[in-house]
Image (spheres, helix red, strand yellow):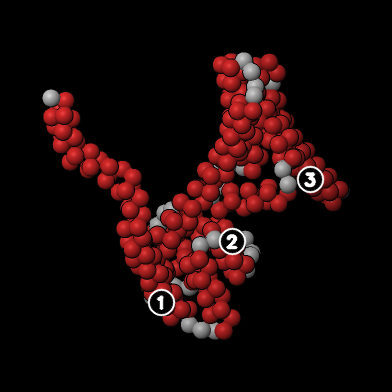
């Protein structure tokens, strides 16, 4: 009898425990489902559409459609080159957005000058067609020129900040830090495109990519000659077992020497570059200021 009572008690406690756990789980699930229903039914379809901005409802889909149509006409090699330039420029926009802006620029330039020609002259002759073609070419070139300028400006910032960054890496490595820790210290203490790219490289290494592959991808994203030389030296030093601190010291000195040589080259080229504005603008102004009063007096004396 006692054994039967103990068995019934154990069975009842287990049954109550299972029922309680089941009710607790179901209540939590039901509460979450109720919250999700409240969030989804808070706004109906019309109010949700009204909350979306005009640019997101109209302009963005139209731009994407224009970019898709324009991108289907362009060759794949050109799209690959544009995507690479966007990466080198720091990804200011997506490839689809750039292609859409490019198409809009071409259509706007050609359409605007065509409308102006038809409105003013009411006819389209060879001269008007040539003007439309010229403005179409300008609209075709402007986005590419802007992108190339963005890439060059970013590369110039990297070249400017590279010697100081290498000095800091060298000091950190000589103090006992590893290369990755030294690069992380440089990325945290500096700013600019070089620090951003180093942070991305370290993130790739953390996610499991080899350091060699991450460094090569870093050079491909920037395409700076000094940085490529530094990365190649670091990779060779790791493969050959050479001390990385000595390699960093040599690379830092070489990069500073190159920067000084570039500055001297720019200083020597400045005199030649100043020759054309001197001849075209400054010398005529000097001649006009010096000979102007004499010319006025000569004309007044001849008039008498």
Considering depth in this image, is 228 or 15 the residue closer to the camera? 228
Contact, CB < 8 Å: mark 1 with mark 3? no
> In the figure, 74 relative to 293: above or below?
below
Number of numbered callouts drawn: 3
Q: Secondary structure at mark 2?
A: helix
On the image, the x and y values in percent for residue 163 come to 39, 66
Q: Earlier in the sequence, mark 1 or mark 3?
A: 3
Viewer-side label of 2, 3: 2
**174, 235: nearer the viewer:** 235
Left or right, residue 68 beside residue 283: right
Q: Residue at x 84, y 51 (%)?
A: 3
Q: Name the residue: 71% across, 36% down.
A: 70
The span from disc 2 to disc 3 (Cα, nearest Å) is 65 Å
Q: Position of residue 67 (x, y in %)?
A: 68, 35
Residue 53 visible (yes or no): no
Q: Secondary structure at mark 3?
A: helix
According to the picture, the residue beneath numbered tag 2 turns out to be: 220
Q: Within the image, what quadrant is residue 171 found in? A: bottom left
Marks 1 and 2, Cα distance to the nearest angstrom? 23 Å
- Secondary structure of the residue carrying tag 1 is helix
Decide which of tag 1 and tag 2 comes sooner along the chain: 2
- In which quadrant of the rendered view does residue 119 lie? top right
As drawn, 32 above or below 197 = above
| Residue labelled with disc 1 | 249
Whole-number angstrom distance, CA of label 1 to CA of label 3: 72 Å
Circle 2 residues within 10 Å: few <14, some 14–19, many ≥20: some
Which sits earlier in the primary sequence, circle 2 or circle 3? 3
Q: Which of the image's four quarters has the C terminus?
A: top left
Is residue 113 toward the left or the right of residue 33 in the image? left
Q: Which residue is mark 3?
A: 14
Which residue corresponds to the image point at 59% horizontal and 66% vertical from the top-left?
A: 216
């Amino acid at each position: 009898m006692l054994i039967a009572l103990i068995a019934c008690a154990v069975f009842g406690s287990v049954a109550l425990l299972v029922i309680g756990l089941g009710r607790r789980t179901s209540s939590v699930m039901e509460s979450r489902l109720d919250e999700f229903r409240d969030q989804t039914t808070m706004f109906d379809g019309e109010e949700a559409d009204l909350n979306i901005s005009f640019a997101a409802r109209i302009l963005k889909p139209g731009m994407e459609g224009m970019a898709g149509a324009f991108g289907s006409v362009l060759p794949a090699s050109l799209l690959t080159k544009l995507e690479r330039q966007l990466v080198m420029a720091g990804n200011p926009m997506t490839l689809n957005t750039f292609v859409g802006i490019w198409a809009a620029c071409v259509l706007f330039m050609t359409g605007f000058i065509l409308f102006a020609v038809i409105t003013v002259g009411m006819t389209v002759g060879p001269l008007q067609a040539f003007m439309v073609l010229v403005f179409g070419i300008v609209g075709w070139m402007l986005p590419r020129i802007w992108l190339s300028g963005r890439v060059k400006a970013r590369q110039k910032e990297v070249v400017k900040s590279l010697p100081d960054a290498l000095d800091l890496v060298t000091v950190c490595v000589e103090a006992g830090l590893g290369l990755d820790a030294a690069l992380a210290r440089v990325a945290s203490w500096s700013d600019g495109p070089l620090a951003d790219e180093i942070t991305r490289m370290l993130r790739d290494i953390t996610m499991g990519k080899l350091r060699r592959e991450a460094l090569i991808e870093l050079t491909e994203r920037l395409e700076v000659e000094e940085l490529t030389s530094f990365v190649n030296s670091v990779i060779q030093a790791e493969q050959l077992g050479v001390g990385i601190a000595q390699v960093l010291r040599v690379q830092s000195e070489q990069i500073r020497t190159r920067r000084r040589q570039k500055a001297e080259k720019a200083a020597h080229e400045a005199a030649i570059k100043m020759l054309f504005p001197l001849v075209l603008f400054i010398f005529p102004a000097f001649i006009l200021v010096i000979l102007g009063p004499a010319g006025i007096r000569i004309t007044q004396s001849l008039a008498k």
